[in-house]
Amino acid sequence: MSLQHFSHQHPLVFIESHGHEIEKVNCSGCGKLVSGSSFACVECGFYLHKQCTEAPAEMDHPFHRNHNLNLLTRNPYKIGTSTCDFCQKPCKNFVYHCSCNLNFHIKCALFSHSIAEKGNAEFQDISRIDPLINTGNVTEELKKAECFACWKPLLDSVYFSPNCGFYLHAKCLDLPAEINHIFHQEHPLFLQFNSQRLSCKICQKPQRRGFVYCCSPCKFALHIQCATIPTKINQPFHRKHPLILQSVDECLPCQICQETTNLNDVVYFCSICKFVLHIRPRMPPPPLPQLLPSRYRRCGVPSRGTIKGAIFKDIVKTIAAATTTAAFSRHSDVI
């Protein structure tokens, strides 16, 4: 069996498996050592994995809804090199490219497409590692590794064995492809590569890598972590009203860290009481006595040690619990 591939001038012959005599031949598509079935022009020393041979010349990728990705046999730029927007490593062989300046290794494009299509069957045979249980054999490389989807430390959560060739949290495989969020009620937000390099509308920080929840026409983006933050919380130290996650057009002090907010900062806010909390406050100076529950007061004056100990821990635990327990379901509404 043979075929004509656009990347080579001669027909490629199918090879069922590779013997030891050509064991160290690299695939011209992905650059990895050839193993298993492949197509080859033995005379030219040109080999392609079967998977790389069958990769489409044009890919409609669910994580990039703006344009199709085109498969190129070399770096698309005349000057400089291209970097994969999934794994952040240089693209030295075939590359999927878009005019948005998105570039992916052929295997990174296929792998991320499988994630988008919820091809969970491909992951069933990949072991999952819990960093809280598997504390041994943690290399320095793993300590520095980041998840290719959310770009948070890999060891922060259960992850797939790096033997699969990718750094990926197990939870990132189950992210919904589409959500509705109260901060952008005009359109749904889709899980996308951040090709437009948009800043998050909640934390207002840029993220050059990984996925975001995005409305491309409106240039609206939320980081994965920020999209999971609850938009309404109840706090024991402000029992009168719930605190709503919103943009505030006043400069008010956070009632934990006392740092004044900037105009249009997104914070937890009670508009009636002008009560503000940063989403992630810093270690505070002593708050005002009237803000503290009675058990933390001493003759009407709060104890510095008590505040820095019990009250701050209570506050942070409450916010952290509300944040970390927020979970998505497919097409979930964050309200």
Image (tube, helix red, strand yellow):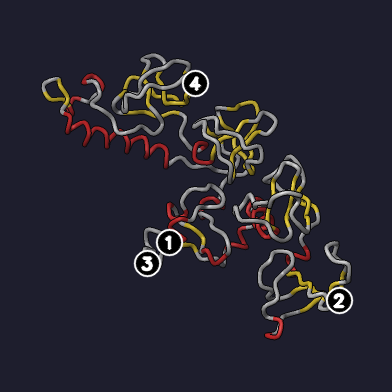
Residue 221 x %, y %:
59, 34
Q: Which residue is mark 3?
A: 136
Name the N-terminal-most of marks 3 and 4.
3
Q: Tag 1: residue type?
A: Glu
Distance in Å between CA atoms under marks 2 and 3: 48 Å
Disc 4 crowd rating (10 Å Cα; few below 14, some 14-19, many 20+) is: some
Residue 132 location, quadrant: bottom left
Q: Which element is circle 4 on? A: loop
Residue 198 in picture, x, y percent from top left: 61, 34
What amino acid type is highlighted by mark number 2?
Met
The quadrant in which the N terminus is found is bottom right
Which amino acid is tagged 3? Gly
- The secondary element bearing badge 2 is classed as loop
Q: Nearer the viewer, mark 2 or mark 4?
A: 4
- Does residue 256 appear to the left or right of 97 in the view shown? left
Give the residue drawn at x 18%, y 25%.
Answer: 294
* 3D distance between C-alphas at marks 4 and 1: 40 Å
To which residue does mark 4 refer?
A: 264
Q: Amino acid at mark 4?
A: Asn
Residue 1, numbered label: 2
Q: Which residue is mark 1?
A: 140
| Residue 57, x across and y down, in percent | 81, 56
Nearest the viewer among 300 and 230 is 300
Q: Identify the mark nearer the N-term, 4 or 1.
A: 1
Which of the two labelled residues, at mark 2 and mark 3, occupies the earlier sequence position? 2
Badge nearest the viewer, 4 or 1? 1
Frontmost of labels 2 and 3 is 3
Q: Residues within 10 Å of mark 1 (few under 14, many from 20)?
A: few
Circle 3: element type:
loop
